[in-house]
Image (spheres, helix red, strand yellow):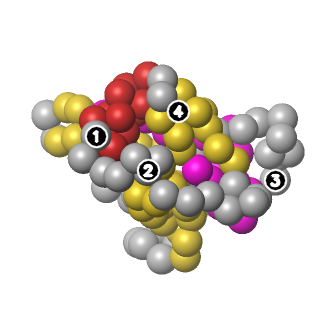
Amino acid sequence: MTDTLEHPVTVSDRAAKRIAKILTGEPDGSMLRVSVEGGGCSGLQYKYDLVTSREDDDLAIEKNGITVLVDSMSLEYMSGSEIDFVDDLIGQSFQINNPHATSGCGCGTSFTI
């Protein structure tokens, strides 16, 4: 895997704006946690949670007043990725542009490395 310190995860302006909108209805100090877990139709899938605390090994990405957390194990699979938000004719969703993913499913939430 790529060195995660050299290639951190980034958040697009569109994603930061959407996360800020989501967090307006949440308790102060809420953050978005993005993680990778086994499952989905391609073997691994992204999981999104709203949390109010962070772990010692989390990567904290701060942008435009929001914070996105990625745990160290998930970072192994996500280094170099960009978290984006897409709003098109098919619908709205967060999408992760992951350079390690060799294939993915049509919904964009699961992938293979």
For label 3, the residue is 1
Front position in the image: 55 or 49: 55
Residue 35 x/y as whole percent: 55, 61
Residue 67 lies, with reference to residue 17, above or below; the image says: below
Number of other residues with Cα within 10 Å of mark 1, as a class: few under 14, some 14 to 19, many 20 or more: few
Extent of the magenta region: 69-86
User: Which image quarter is the C terminus in?
Assistant: bottom right
Q: Mark 4 falls on what kind of element?
A: strand
- Could you tell which of marks 4 and 1 lies nearer the N-terminus? 4
Tag in front: 3 or 2: 2
Tag in front: 3 or 1: 1
For label 1, the residue is 24
Q: Are marks 4 and 1 in contact (CB under 8 Å)?
A: no
Residue 29 x/y as whole percent: 47, 47
- Could you tell which of marks 3 and 4 lies nearer the N-terminus? 3
- Could you tell which of marks 3 and 1 lies nearer the N-terminus? 3
Q: Are marks 3 and 4 in contact (CB under 8 Å)?
A: no
Q: Disc 3 residue type?
A: Met
Q: Mark 1 falls on what kind of element?
A: loop
| Residue 70 counted in the magenta span | yes
Q: Disc 2 residue type?
A: Ser
Residue 55 lies, with reference to residue 91, above or below; the image says: below
- Residue shown at 81%/53% (left/top)? 1
Real-space CA distance between mark 3 and mark 1, rounded to the nearest whole angstrom: 36 Å
